[in-house]
Amino acid sequence: MYVNHTITNYFIIKGISDVPEIQITIFIIVLLVYLITLVGNMTILLLICLDSHLHTPMYFFLANLSIVDMTCTTAALHKILMSFVTGDKTISFSGCMAQTFMSGSLTVHELFILTAMSYDRYVAICNPLRYHLNMSQRNCAFLASLCWVLGFLLVAPLVGILSSFSCYSSVEVNHFLCDIVPLMKITCSNTSLLDVLFFIEGLFLFTIIPFLLTFIPYIFILAAILRIQSNIGRHKAFYTCSSHLTVVILLYTILASQYLTPSSTSSLDSKKLFALFNAVAIPLLNPLIYSLKNKDVKVALGRKLNRSKIFT
């Protein structure tokens, strides 16, 4: 069968659903979730900046996580939200590559920030006497900077190769954003190098290495918790890790379903649903998990609300 191969300078984002009757409903839901995500993460970020009791390494990394969540969900959803308003689903080639790079880099950065938070919990529970030395402001700033740099550097080669492709069998991207996988599906260029690099980086640098660096400390943390004699002490130690562990398990489950499942058993449409959950639900759940399960955040919020009432 003959396939029309074209050199394109734009793409058409297919969107979340093709059913016209539910477009307004989808727009309202996505917009509300997006706004709640921004408000929730901005609240966490402002609390950490304004409350001196939260000026600790754990909340420094949590502030970084809030910035990543707000930026990542904006990068992923801004085009599809605008298309609901304007009706224009086209995106330029350079804009598509920029969105692919930003959403991919920020997702990788979130994985490494969660790894740094895991190390912080390990030092706090397993080596508390050296906590202030190991988690000094300088070391925390270095770890956070390293996470940002790694996020951008590791994704840059993938997007660099992808941006060199100009021949596509279709300009319609079966997704709600530009991403590497759906773009690879429609290109007629030779993707062998990108396939190998994407497999190596996706499996090892984006999955196995940060996964091991995140969960191995929890083996030592669990061993340290079990050695604590009192039930109150064990509960307190586990409570400080539960929020972070919940976020990590949720994020890795979604990413594995989105990128590591074989194409034969998972269609692009199902991967799109996982990507939507990752872009919308994860950034929304992060501030909820850390605020509802974190006593320090709730106390800090209460202090700020009480001060606002007194001032009023």
Image (cartoon, rainbow, N blue to C red):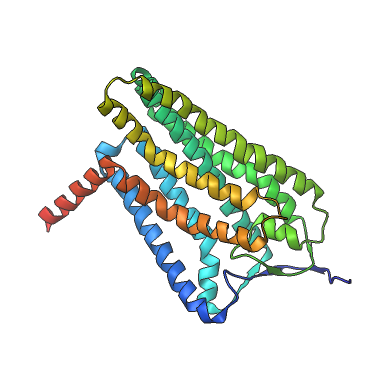
How many marks the image carries: the answer is 0
- Kindly identify the residue that appears in the image at 85 percent across and 70 percent down: 3
Q: Is 143 above or below relative to 74?
A: above
Can the viewer see residue 106 in this picture? no
In the image, taking residue 135 as reference, residue 155 lies left or right, namely: right
Measuring from the top left, give residue 186's x and y in whole percent. Answer: 75, 63
Q: Is 218 above or below relative to 229?
A: below
- Kindly identify the residue that appears in the image at 25 percent across and 28 percent down: 232
Q: Is 123 above or below relative to 104?
A: above
In the image, taking residue 149 as reference, residue 285 lies left or right, namely: left
Measuring from the top left, give residue 102's x and y in whole percent. Answer: 57, 53
Measuring from the top left, give residue 194's x and y in whole percent. Answer: 76, 48
In the image, taking residue 265 as reference, residue 29 lies left or right, namely: left
Q: Residue furthest right?
A: 1
Image quarter hosting the C terminus? bottom left
Q: Is 229 above or below relative to 216?
A: above
Q: Residue furthest bottom?
A: 21
- Kindly identify the residue that appears in the image at 40 percent across and 26 percent down: 135
Front in this rendered view, residue 11 or 232: 232
Front in this rendered view, residue 85 or 292: 292
In the image, taking residue 105 as reference, residue 268 lies left or right, namely: right
- Kindly identify the residue that appears in the image at 27 percent across and 26 percent down: 231
Image quarter hosting the N terminus? bottom right
Can the viewer see residue 183 in this picture? yes
Q: In which quarter of the image is residue 134?
A: top left
